[in-house]
Amino acid sequence: MTLPQHLVPSLDGVAPGDAVTVEGDEAHHAVVVRRLRLGEAVQLADGAGRVVTGAVSATGKRAFTVVAAEVVDHPEPQPRLVVVQALPKGDRGELAVEVLTEIGVARIVPWAAARSVAVWKGERAAKSHAKWQATAREAAKQSRRAWHPEVTPLASTADLAALVAGVDLAVVLHEDATEPLPAIAVPQDGEILVVVGPEGGLTDEEVAHLVTAGAVAVRLGAEVLRTSTAGLAAVSALLARTPRWG
């Protein structure tokens, strides 16, 4: 049976038999909205690999306590997938974050591409970033991930060169690329980065900047995908050639 997962700030030092109290909005939603009951089996995760399974021993309006029955430390899946996601319009950004989280991406980097319709500035930037973080958190819980993804602050095109230089493989999805994604060698550990452009596509300058930094321009296929789903397709194709999906 798949147990509901609840996120807690830390599970350091927790052992079987210990009581763990969950507080705040996470607990309120579980108790008031989900109607969490005494004795119900649940899963607690810290988002950094540790997962506790146990039964609810006490509840309140904004808190509940779980007695740990099992504590498991999960190693971080290898290779790690990082997706640079150009800002899409409307709520397509949250859709991209949701599906990328569900498939197991370790880090999502929002990117202010030249042709991005959406603009994150001032108060809107803070709100939009918070939405992406909340979407990732809920999607990670829904998919029962032991390691939850990081949503980084907004990156500029200039920031991407350092990201590309720091990974084992970086690919840029580009409709005019001559090399298909399945043709490139995929590392079996380390870090893989995927760059997804906006609705209007990448500029020649952006592609040149990324390729100069060490990225490989690749195409997915003849079909034109939305920016909110292109990352999912690329990550799926890459994971299928790693031990994670082997």
Image: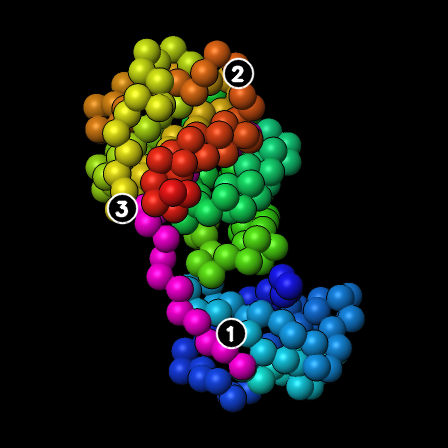
First in sequence: mark 1 vs mark 3: 1
On screen, residue 200 versus residue 244, left or right, reads right
Check disc 3: other Cα within 10 Å, few if <14, some if 14-19, many if 20+: some
First in sequence: mark 1 vs mark 2: 1
Q: What residue does disc 1 label?
A: 52
Dot 1 lies on which element? strand
Which residue is at a point 55% across and 71% down the rendered structure image? Answer: 44
Which residue is at a point 38% across and 46% down the rendered structure image? Answer: 244
What quarter of the picture does the C terminus occupy? top left
Q: Nearer the viewer, residue 193 or 126?
A: 193
**Tag 3 near tag 2, CB within 8 Å:** no
First in sequence: mark 3 vs mark 2: 3
Q: Position of residue 198 (x, y in %)?
A: 49, 24
Q: CA distance from mark 1 to mark 3?
A: 27 Å
Q: What residue does disc 2 label?
A: 224
**Tag 1 near tag 2, CB within 8 Å:** no
Check disc 1: other Cα within 10 Å, few if <14, some if 14-19, many if 20+: many
Q: CA distance from mark 1 to mark 2?
A: 42 Å
What type is the residue that disc 3 sits on? Asp
How many marks do you count on the picture?
Answer: 3
Q: What residue does disc 3 label?
A: 189
Dot 2 lies on which element? loop
Q: Is residue 8 visible?
A: no
Which residue is at a point 62% across and 72% down the rendered structure image? Answer: 42
What type is the residue that disc 1 sits on? Val
Range of magenta residues: 69-88
